[in-house]
Amino acid sequence: MTKRIKVQIFEDGTVQAEVAGVKGKKCTNYIKILEDILAAETVDSDYTKEYYETEKVILDEVDHQELKVGE
């Protein structure tokens, strides 16, 4: 899933944002970026189900060959 932030700005100046495609606590980093850009402060927040999920990281094993000095 693509990482994205949905931002709504209402007539009274209220900003509502929702982060999607980011699992775990990393989503809160995106809200911090918005706060910095808008010079704003979060006054209320709710977590999506993705906040409580764990991001899966797949590592490929690479074959390593030893190189002996003097060969």
Image (spheres, rainbow, N blue to C red):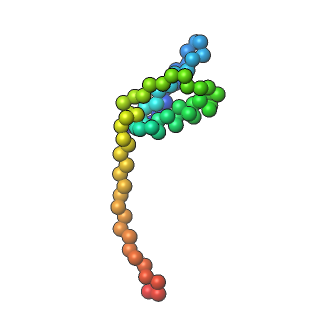
Q: Is residue 46 above or below residue 66?
A: above
Q: Quadrant of residue 24?
A: top left
Image quarter (top left, top right, bottom left or bottom right) of the C terminus: bottom left
Q: Position of residue 37 (x, y in %)?
A: 62, 31
Question: Given the current orientation, which residue lies at the most extreme front position?
Answer: 43
Q: Is residue 19 above or below residue 58?
A: above
Identify the residue at horizontal 56%, vertical 33% (top origin).
32
Q: Position of residue 14 (x, y in %)?
A: 57, 17
Q: Can residue 2 be seen at all in this image of the molecule? A: no
Q: Can residue 50 be seen at all in this image of the molecule? A: yes
Total of numbered circles in the picture? Answer: 0
Q: Position of residue 35 (x, y in %)?
A: 59, 30
Q: Is residue 59 above or below residue 51?
A: below
Q: Position of residue 9 (x, y in %)?
A: 55, 19
Q: From the viewer's perspective, is 53 left or right of 32?
A: left
Question: Given the current orientation, which residue lies at the most extreme right position?
Answer: 39
Image quarter (top left, top right, bottom left or bottom right) of the N terminus: top left
Q: From the viewer's perspective, is 24 left or right of 42?
A: left
Identify the residue at horizontal 47%, vertical 83% (top origin).
69
Identify the residue at horizontal 59%, vertical 12% (top origin).
12
